Image (cartoon, rainbow, N blue to C red):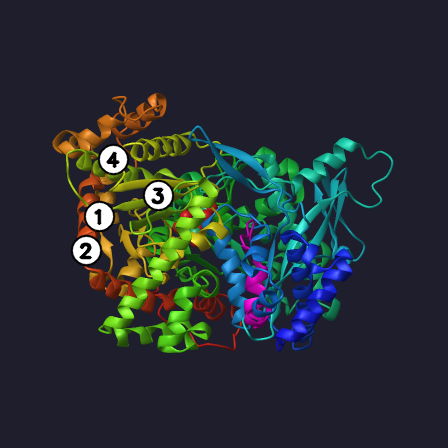
Amino acid sequence: MALTKEQFITEFKDMALKLYAAPIEDLSSQQLYQALALLTRSYIAQPWADTKERYDEEETKQVFYFSIEFLPGRLLQSNLLNLGILDEVEAGLEELDLHPQKIFAAEADPGLGNGGLGRLASAFMDAMASVGMAGNGNGIRYQYGLFKQAFVNGYQVELPDDWMRNGFPWETRKENRAVTVKFGGWVELRPSRSGHLRVIYHNTDDVLAVPYDVAMVGYHNGVVNNLRLWSAEAPINAGPHFTLEQRERINQITQILYPDDSDNAGKELRLRQEYFFTSAGIQSIVRHYRRTHNSMAGFADRVAIHINDTHPAMAIPELMRVLMDDEHVGWDEAWRITLKVMSYTNHTLLSEALEVWPIDMFSGLLPRIYQIVQEIDRRFRLAFVPQFGQAMIDRIAPLGNGQVRMAYLATIGSHAVNGVAPLHSELLKKDVLHDLFQIFPERFNNKTNGITPRRWIQIGDRPLAHLLDKKIGTAWRQNPLALRKLHDYIDDTRFLADLNATKAENKRELAKYIDQTVHVKVDPDAIFDVQIKRLHAYKRQLLHLLGILDAYLAIKRGEKRPKRLHIFGAKAAPSYVYAKEIIKVMNAVADMVDSDPEVSPYLQVVFLPNYGVSMAEKIIPAADISEQISTAGKEASGTSNMKLMSAGALTLATLDGANIEIKNAVGDDNIEIFGLTEKEIAGYYQRGDYRSRDFYEKDPRLHAVLDMLVNGKIPGIETEGRDIYNALLMYNDEYFVLADFESYLAANARLDKLYQQPELWAKKALVNIAESGRFSADFTVQRYGREIWHVIPQTPEDDGSDTEA
Ligand code: 7GP
């Protein structure tokens, strides 16, 4: 859109006055933020309405991305950028003597997700709008987002995230679009006079699902899509028997986000949440479709529904229910439509994360849905037992072992099933969904994850963005593949120096931020070594920690090395004891290193509390090293690896998830690979001959490091140090930390050496930035659009770089 600085100033002053009856000089950052957000929203309103009208008029096929998590990050700056008025607005604010960054920072960061899965969903929303695809989100409006993390005496404590305290200016309550979701009770099936089945519900708990819509603004294209977040409320005419307790139970449904990441939260409330937003979404989609169509016959040509991991997998039986019970479509036709509409992404290979529900709980809470799942199960068995045998079908039918098995249900009810990086997609076929792959090989495919360079470079890394503009022009902002032009400057000494200067500037900024937030002074000339992601044993923050302890001991012995600053950001699930113990030990090591004048000139450790999207925007631009060190075969893809690469950090990585694709993109010389491969680890499993103690016994460095966990050298970790020590030695080190220790150290030593050659380092950083464009989520959603959803996007062409699994 077009907006001059002068126009903006007038409209902004006007808005602020209308809202607060005061001149802008008197307003707090929060008030200025509110005024600016509302003004921005007023700019979005028309294109939002127009987009919707156009989709309806042109009967565009629409994608609905169902996800129990969304992590959009702060929206003000991103909306201004995508509207194309960020520069004008910032100039206007400055002219008013205001600080744009201060105002942007007043926005709450909606933590409606745990980690990778939720952030991916939001990246896809931004990308779909930006490539002009009709893509809608469907999720939950959690009143409290992911807990706020604080450290007390080095321990993680969880505080409530009251993110809506100041309201959420981007949402629009659409009570005229509310639907009713039914739980519990019992169902009676009765043939009606017209020959249809009549489904009569008795004694159900009804919940009103009220949608709040959030605009998803496309980049410079006038497209504004919709993210619909559902809130649970008591039914309007609930009647006099409706108790406060019942009301409370309803409110609970959308009160909190389950803080579990890569874990199966087997709680009834979680099941309620899942059915709540899934049913509300399906009902609302069908209702909208039926406003302009008098049968459901063409539904699958107009609607694609994507199931982001299994949490919304009840979309399958729910659509069957609506088709049969409400729309009177017969089973076979309903199933044909459902299969064509549904597609499913798996995000993890960890078996503890595969969702299952006890049949008793499931059937009690969702009696009609359970009947439908039983019928899906019955027909599946009928169709495939003859060819594949009872034993195999028993293993993979939707119902088994007294459980509803969501990943199997999702696979059976979708026409496409994908993993999120080639290795992951291969392992799905080989292990987790192997039997189902035998039956439905054509459904399985790979869609490598992506990120949005708009947020990570254009907004998060302004110094780099400006340097790029100067050197290669601005085309990369529209099409990130244009970053490849950078290769032309691989021998341009001046440019390489500029690149290093940009990194140095970002590191000084982060140092300031660290000082402000945790009151720790860090040396901006140190190597910034970053590991930011959820805390999980398989991600092996512990390996990183053991590396730090080894460095500590080496420095104590008198070894000199380039100074390294280790930066961690990670939340642990509140119930995940081992992960919390690792946090405690890390904080203790950070203190120990800091208070030792022999060591602190060479080594520093900072664990930043409350890692999230906004903090990532600060850390990533300043990173020199990106630690992606999961046990091979465990990290489905990873996405911080892509973000850090695009900021020119060198990746220190195992051959896992999308690290493999990063390696293929940049070449072996521009990434630091170490550790066991997935095949080697699978070999250990098969032979059953991994003995972690052997590594401890034969490697004196490892021996010394592990002993530090229990010999009292690190203050205050008696219990935690012992537990970790035991996990690694007595319980045989489930994640092969000890096996990879030696090669991890060697890789680190190579990076230390390389850092002595700044120009060579800059060349490698350049290649990383240049090749990061392929990981733009714009391309990812286009691949989904072409190969899974069958919608035809109009703008930038994909280079087809995805490797099929
Ligand atoms: C994550 C995966 O661990 C990560 O490797 C991947 O990049 C990301 O999804 C996006 O695909 N998984 C989760 O966040 C998660 O909660 C459990 O998985 C279902």
| Residue picked out by circle 3 | 539
Sequence order check: which comes first, mark 4 or mark 3?
A: 3
Name which residue type carries label 4. Answer: Leu
Provide residue 629's location: percent of width, then percent of height.
30, 47
The residue shown at (38%, 72%) is 468
Q: Is disc 1 in contact with disc 4, using a CB cutoff of under 8 Å?
A: no
Asked whether mark 2 lies closer than 8 Å to ligand 1, one says no
Name which residue type carries label 1. Answer: Pro
Seen from the viewer's position, the closer of residues 71 and 308 is 71
Provide residue 45's location: percent of width, then percent of height.
69, 68
| Residue picked out by circle 4 | 549
| Residue picked out by circle 1 | 562
Q: Which residues are magenta?
A: 62-89
Neighbourhood count class around disc 1 (C-alpha, 10 Å): few under 14, some 14–19, many 20 upward: some
Sequence order check: which comes first, mark 1 or mark 3?
A: 3
Q: Is residue 87 left or right of residue 246?
A: left
Say which mark, if any, is on residue 756.
2
State how far apart marks 4 and 3 are (Cα): 18 Å
Quarter assignment of residue 75: bottom right
